[in-house]
Amino acid sequence: MPFYVSPEQLMKDRADFARKGIARGRSVVAVQYADGILFASENPSQALHKVSEIYDRIAFAAVGRYNEFENLRIAGVRLADMRGYAYDRRDVTGRGLANAYAQTLGTIFSSGGEKPYEVEIFVGEIGDAPEEDQIFRLTYDGQVADVHQYAVMGGAADSVSAYLKERYAAGASLEGALRLAVGALGHTDAEDRVIPVRDLEVAVLDRTRTRPRKFLRLMPSRLETLLGGRGPEVASPPAPGDTDPGAASSGVRVDNPADPTDQTSGHIAPLEDPVTGEPPVAPPDAGSDGGRPL
């Protein structure tokens, strides 16, 4: 007969598993400012985003396993598009998307057939006035919380949240909110560090934009202008087992010119053929023999 495990112990084990996976990711910060909501995270990857657009006034941010929260993001985009097409664009709300995500995460967590999702999610929506802005935080087990002013998830969330609690001021400008969020991400119990601009992923929901779509991703050139004069930048060491896109466990290989066995570096000649002793010969051009392009 199979071993018996009480429901309480089973749920506790699944929750511990999800929390450990989320804690290995890098923190994501959401901060309300005068003109909207700012999302910031440390993400060295330029191709895999943790902050994205869902609909006109709605943004999505997540931390944890990329493949899992990317599936949730795509499902949210499809749901919003279908609802806006079938009814009206004003019927697509952050509250409705948060409820849909909560049902999905809760079903997966309580199911015994698959592992729980190692993700936490922010769903942000801006209104016509600052008091109408909303930020929903969803946990791995489907719980929904309506947060205000600022919120943090993943990584060293307690340390970052304590930094924001001491320094947050309502009605700040974009520059002030950005400096606060980036300073919080670089805050540690031992020593604060300055995160390089190229390792930051920042996006805003800006109500002052004249276009219907209020989502805007801040490029490195603008970040350098807003964050100028911060001091020497220090990149964070990769966390072992980090599940975020910019983690060292992503399998991305970095060339080492000092390594004579590194064949992708341009400073070292290729190894000789072990049989003939001659350098390898490049394959013939596809056009020389009338071959078709692959």
Image (cartoon, rainbow, N blue to C red):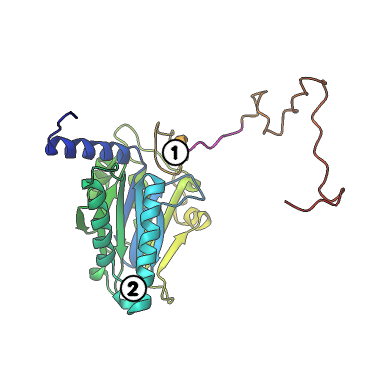
Q: Residue furthest front?
A: 1
CB within 8 Å, label 1 to label 2 = no
Q: Position of residue 97 (x, y in %)?
A: 29, 64
Residue mark closest to the camera, 1 vs 2: 2
Who's the residue at 42% across and 55% down the image?
202
Q: Is residue 170 visible?
A: no
Amino acid type indicated by mark 2:
Arg
In-front residue for pair 126/98? 98
Question: Is 91 located above or below residue 217 in the figure?
Answer: below
Q: Position of residue 224 (x, y in %)?
A: 49, 53
Q: Which residue is mark 2?
A: 83
Region of the chain picked out in magenta, as a range: 250-255
Q: Which residue is mark 1?
A: 247
- Left or right: where does residue 257 sit relative to residue 83? right
Q: Residues within 10 Å of mark 1 (few under 14, many from 20)?
A: many
Q: Is residue 92 visible?
A: yes
Who's the residue at 40% across and 53% down the image?
70
Q: Main secondary structure of the magenta part?
A: loop
In 3D space, how far apart are the residues under numbered discs 1 and 2 (Cα atoms)? Answer: 36 Å
Who's the residue at 39% across and 33% down the image?
241
Q: Position of residue 2 (x, y in %)?
A: 19, 30
Q: Residue furthest bottom?
A: 88
Who's the residue at 35% across and 62% down the image?
76
Label 1 vs 2, first from the N-terminus: 2
Q: Is residue 38 magenta?
A: no
- Left or right: where does residue 142 sit relative to residue 177? left
The mark found on residue 130 in the picture is none
Q: How many marks?
A: 2
In-front residue for pair 175/156? 156
Q: Position of residue 198 (x, y in %)?
A: 50, 47
Q: Is residue 253 magenta?
A: yes
